[in-house]
Image (spheres, rainbow, N blue to C red):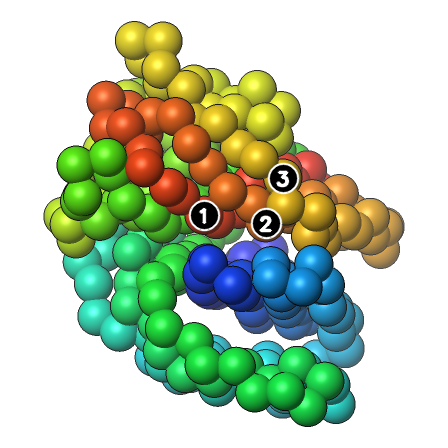
Amino acid sequence: MRKRWRYVGFYGEDLMLCAAVVRIGVASHTFWSVWDRARGRAWEHTRLRPGGTEVVLDGPVVEIRTGNVRAALRFGESQPIEVVAPSGRGWAWTRKRAGVPVSGRVVLDGETRTVEGFGVDDESAGYHQRHVEWKWSAGVGESTDGRGIGWNLVEGINDAPTASERAIWVDGEPYEPGPVVFDGLDRVGFEGGRDLEFEFGGAERRRHDDFRVIRSDYVHRFGTFGGHLDDIELEAGAGVMEEHRVAW
């Protein structure tokens, strides 16, 4: 079956959120999650039925439309990376951007919050092999010497030694680091012995779905980062760690 999804994330000092539209064959679903870092509250929802407008991803426009959580964001321009990789007898395509300018507003239980900062945009599609398991991290931040940083790191999918989807953006310019190794959802190890350390913030999206033909175990965590991205020392970082095991 053909798979296609788009995931966007905003990772700010006071607020983090993500929203996604996923299509597997003729089936589709949407999900979103919001973490109010300042107040330690989280909201999230998954809609398994097709149709509806709970999540709208229309080019640069990102909207979440529910009763107590609403968002209207605009994702700006940034340089993408794009790869096509083998997946068993099939193939996978992905286009990633990190360090994308994001602006707009979010309404949480009637209170409007202004959003200004950076995020990520992940578009993927293809005819992936039936069983896939991966770990993924994406985020934004600043190096100790003041450069703007974004990243997309993965183990288990599109992760060949070269021409992979791994990328680190430095002041908007991406480059491909070498292969990485995930230690659970706690850290990401780079060649040369340096690690990107993750501190879980307490906002987690976790699902187990079994529809016979399609089965999925998924964990997505918001948090902050320290340590190193390759040979770049982080002053501060924010983003996600994800683990997904799927039969599709």
Residue 236 pos. (x, y %): 37, 41
Q: Earlier in the sequence, mark 3 or mark 2?
A: 3
Q: Which residue is mark 1?
A: 238
Q: Earlier in the sequence, mark 3 or mark 1?
A: 3
The total number of labels drawn is 3
Residue identified by numbered label 3: 200
Residue 58 numbered mark, or none: none
Quarter of the figure that contains the N terminus: bottom right
Examine the rendered structure and indicate whether residue 11 appears above or below residue 242: below
Image location (x, y in percent) of residue 149: 26, 45
Residue at x 24%, y 28% (from the top left corner): 232
In the rendered image, residue 17, in percent from the top left (x then y), is placed at 55, 65
Mark 3 vs mark 1, CA separation in Å: 10 Å
- At 18% from the left edge and 58% from the top edge, which residue is drawn? 79
- From this view, report whether residue 141 is shown above or below residue 26: above
Are circles 3 and 1 on residues that touch, CB within 8 Å?
no
Tag 1 secondary structure: strand
Within 10 angstroms of label 2, few (less than 14), some, or many (20 or more) residues? many
